[in-house]
């Protein structure tokens, strides 16, 4: 399996891209604690589901996961992002600097 480590920050969290399973995975303390699944449909990358281990919620980990996944999409692809996942949609709505991903390529 090919993975690309995207980030490590002060929380000890890191995000890895696993393109073979269309997923970004969030790791902390050597354990997977979250994921963001996506599907590629034509020129769109559609985020379909995001989750973080309930025991690790309320620490901003889901935001780290989404931000790093979107940064990766921006730098490595020309895909238009479609936020089918409500968390991703809300996150983009509250971060104006990412809203261009919703319309690029159109």
Image (spheres, grey):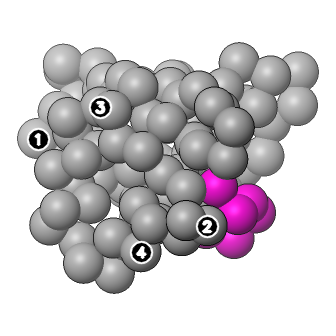
Height in image: 37 above or below 93? above
Q: Do the residues bearing badges 4 and 2 touch, measured as CB atoms within 8 Å?
A: no
Q: Nearer the viewer, residue 4 or 37?
A: 37
Height in image: 62 above or below 69? above
Residue found at the far front of this picture: 106
Q: Which residue is mark 4?
A: 100
Residue 76 lies in quadrant: bottom right
Q: Which residue is mark 1?
A: 58
How far, Cα to Cα, is label 3 from label 1? 18 Å
2 or 1: tag closer to the N-terminus: 1
Question: Going by the image, does 100 lie left or right of 51?
Answer: right
Q: Which residue is mark 3?
A: 85
Q: Position of residue 100 (x, y in %)?
A: 41, 74
Q: Position of residue 70 (x, y in %)?
A: 50, 58
The stretch drawn in magenta includes residue 75: yes
Height in image: 4 above or below 84? below
User: Split into 4 quadrants, where in the image is the N terminus?
Assistant: top right
How far, Cα to Cα, is label 4 from label 2? 10 Å
Helix, strand or loop for disc 2: loop
Q: Which residues make up the magenta segment?
A: 74-79
Q: Nearer the viewer, residue 19 or 78?
A: 78
Is residue 76 visible to the viewer in this orientation of the structure? yes
1 or 4: tag closer to the N-terminus: 1
- Can you tell which of label 2 and label 3 is closer to the viewer? 2
Helix, strand or loop for disc 4: helix
Mark 1, residues whose alpha carbon is within 10 Å: few (<14), some, or many (≥20)? Answer: few
User: Split into 4 quadrants, where in the image is the C terminus?
Assistant: bottom right
Q: Which residue is mark 2?
A: 105
């Amino acid at each position: 399996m090919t993975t690309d480590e995207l980030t490590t920050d002060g929380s000890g969290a890191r995000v890895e891209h696993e393109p073979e399973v269309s997923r970004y995975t969030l790791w902390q303390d050597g354990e997977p604690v979250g994921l963001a699944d996506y599907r590629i449909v034509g020129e769109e990358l559609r985020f379909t589901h995001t989750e973080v281990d309930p025991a690790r919620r309320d620490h901003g980990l889901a935001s780290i996961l989404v931000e790093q996944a979107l940064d990766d999409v921006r730098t490595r692809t020309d895909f238009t992002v479609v936020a089918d996942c409500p968390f991703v949609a809300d996150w983009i709505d509250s971060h104006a600097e990412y809203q261009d991903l919703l319309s690029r390529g159109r």
